[in-house]
Image (cartoon, rainbow, N blue to C red):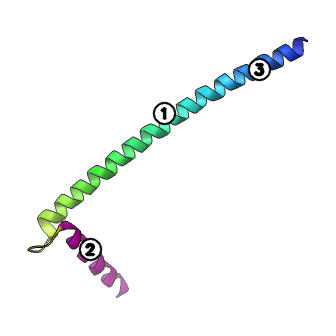
Amino acid sequence: MARSRAAATNKKFERVIRKGYKSIENGVVGGYKKMESGVVYVFSKVTDHFVDLYLTNEDETVEQAKKRLRETQKNRMKM
């Protein structure tokens, strides 16, 4: 009887500990994903602004300039 009670208590502890570790894991991963999306958002804003200021031709949008630059880079890599 004592063993079965100890086993039941160990199972309860196991569930509680797993739940605690899972909540910690979810918090860490969630925080990382938020930080990652914020960094990517800011990076894209900075690159868009740089392309707009320095790399666009007259009457060319930022997307068109990025496409033109990608194609130019691909052509350089082929040579």
Q: Position of residue 46 (x, y in %)?
A: 22, 55
**Residue 10's disc number:** 3
Q: How crowded is mark 2: few (under 14 residues within 10 Å), some or many (20 or more)?
A: few
- Relative to residue 11, is residue 49 depicted above or below? below
**Label 1 vs label 2: CA separation?**
38 Å
Q: Where is residue 59 in the image (x, y as percent from the top left)?
A: 9, 73
The answer to which of 74 and 37 lies nearer the viewer is 37
Q: In this view, does 76 lie to the left or right of 3?
A: left
Q: Which image quarter: residue 67?
A: bottom left
Q: Is residue 46 left or right of residue 19?
A: left
Q: Name the residue under label 2.
A: 67
Q: Where is residue 57 in the image (x, y as percent from the top left)?
A: 12, 74
Mark 1 or 2, nearer chain start: 1
- Relative to residue 32, is residue 70 depicted above or below? below
- Relative to residue 9, is residue 55 depicted above or below? below
Q: Which amino acid does label 3 sit on?
A: Asn
**Label 3 vs label 1: CA separation?**
26 Å
Q: In this view, does 28 lie to the left or right of 46?
A: right
**Label 2 vs label 3: CA separation?**
61 Å
The answer to which of 4 and 28 lies nearer the viewer is 4
In magenta segment, residue 77: yes
Q: What stretch is highlighted in magenta?
A: 62-79
Name the residue: 59% across, 26% down: 20
